[in-house]
Image (cartoon, helix red, strand yellow):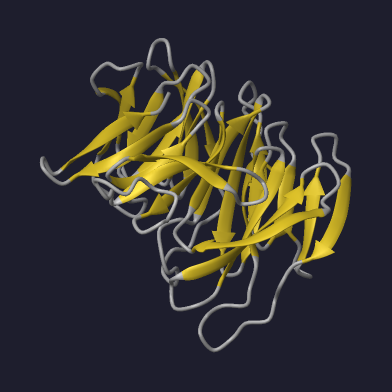
């Protein structure tokens, strides 16, 4: 499942199966109302993004805009070819709408290319940076790992800055490599899995200076999101900061840039955490469906 939240709190969600040729429904949840059909797509969906006026749906061939007021299809932009045959998962395309642009990240092999789309223009997506992973800031800054394994940023005005080196010492257990994970709370968050799919070391960097802020331990499955309530983290069961009774299968906590967690709320079998209005997509094991849990 892939999901995104608009500035007005509306959450759009769809099954994430970009190589499927079957029709796909994109759902929308406004406020606390029921889920309704937003769009019918002729094929699989890779990623979603939304701003105040449009919903953007990406596949492996193009990005299509839909008017949120009417549901009518608008501009369509072609993407460079996405080759999924040798990929380990379906997360080869990511997308976010911020600061008047739509940013599309396409991963092929070990490199990720970030493009920008101007919603008011039919011009082809513009290539901005090529690196080893990226995160988009709230002002449209692109934080990424260079091919030389350093943290870098491209600002909206086109200027760039290269910061500290990132860990790049692969070990036999699959760890030792640090990658850019997300932007939240004015910081860039990086993740370094320890291997074996369990623990990870997180590091935060100041988004203005790229200077290191903190380093702390966590789970490889922890997921941080930037929200109106500040940085929040979705963690699996067993985290000491989660409620003890009843023990949730996952929970959402406040987290600061030094890794301090508090105010845990159990949310069930969570799939993803989205912002700016914090909400969690949850697998409902009782019904076999998905639920949206909103957080105040």
26 or 285: nearer the viewer: 285
Residue 280 % position (x, y): 37, 37
In the image as oriented, which residue stretches furthest toward the front?
245
Residue 124: name its quadrant. Answer: top right
Pick the quarter of the image with the N terminus: top left
Q: Is residue 149 left or right of residue 123?
A: right
Residue 294 % position (x, y): 36, 27
How many numbered marks are there?
0
Q: Is residue 190 left or right of residue 282?
A: right
Q: Is residue 37 left or right of residue 109?
A: left
Q: Is residue 11 above or below residue 246?
A: above
Q: Is residue 283 above or below residue 92?
A: above
Residue 230: name its quadrant. Answer: top right
Residue at the spot x=35%, y=45% of the render?
243
Q: Is residue 151 above or below residue 75?
A: below
In the image as oriented, which residue stretches furthest toward the bottom?
172
Pick the quarter of the image with the C terminus: top left
Residue 247 % position (x, y): 27, 50
Residue 39 % position (x, y): 32, 26
Q: Is residue 107 above or below residue 51?
A: below
Any part of residue 45 in sight = no
Residue at the spot x=75%, y=39% of the render?
141
Residue at the spot x=32%, y=31% of the render?
293
Residue at the spot x=45%, y=34% of the render?
4
């Amino acid at each position: 499942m892939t999901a995104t939240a608009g500035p007005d709190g509306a959450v759009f969600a769809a099954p994430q199966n970009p190589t499927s040729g079957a029709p796909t429904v994109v759902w929308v949840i406004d406020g606390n109302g029921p889920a309704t059909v937003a769009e019918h797509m002729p094929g699989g969906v890779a990623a979603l993004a939304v701003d105040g006026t449009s919903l953007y749906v990406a596949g492996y061939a193009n990005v299509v805009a839909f008017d949120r007021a009417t549901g009518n299809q608008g501009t369509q932009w072609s993407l460079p070819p996405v080759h999924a045959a040798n990929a380990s998962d379906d997360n080869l395309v990511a997308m976010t709408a911020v600061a008047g642009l739509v940013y599309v990240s396409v991963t092929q092999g070990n490199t990720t290319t970030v493009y920008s789309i101007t919603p008011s223009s039919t011009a082809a997506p513009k290539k901005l940076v090529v690196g080893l992973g990226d995160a988009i800031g709230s002002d449209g800054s692109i934080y990424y790992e260079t091919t030389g394994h350093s943290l870098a940023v491209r600002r909206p005005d086109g200027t760039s800055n290269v910061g500290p080196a990132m860990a790049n010492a692969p070990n036999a257990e699959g760890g030792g490599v640090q990658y850019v994970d997300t932007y939240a709370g004015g910081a860039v968050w990086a993740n370094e899995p320890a291997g074996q799919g369990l623990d990870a070391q997180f590091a935060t960097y100041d988004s203005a200076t790229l200077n290191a802020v903190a380093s702390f331990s966590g789970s490889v499955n922890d997921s941080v999101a930037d929200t109106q309530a500040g940085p929040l983290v979705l963690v699996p069961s067993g985290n000491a900061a989660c409620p003890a009774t009843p023990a949730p299968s996952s929970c959402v906590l406040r987290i600061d840039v030094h890794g301090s967690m508090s105010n845990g709320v159990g949310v069930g079998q969570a799939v993803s955490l989205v912002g700016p209005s914090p909400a969690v997509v949850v697998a409902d094991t009782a019904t076999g469906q998905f639920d949206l849990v909103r957080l105040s």
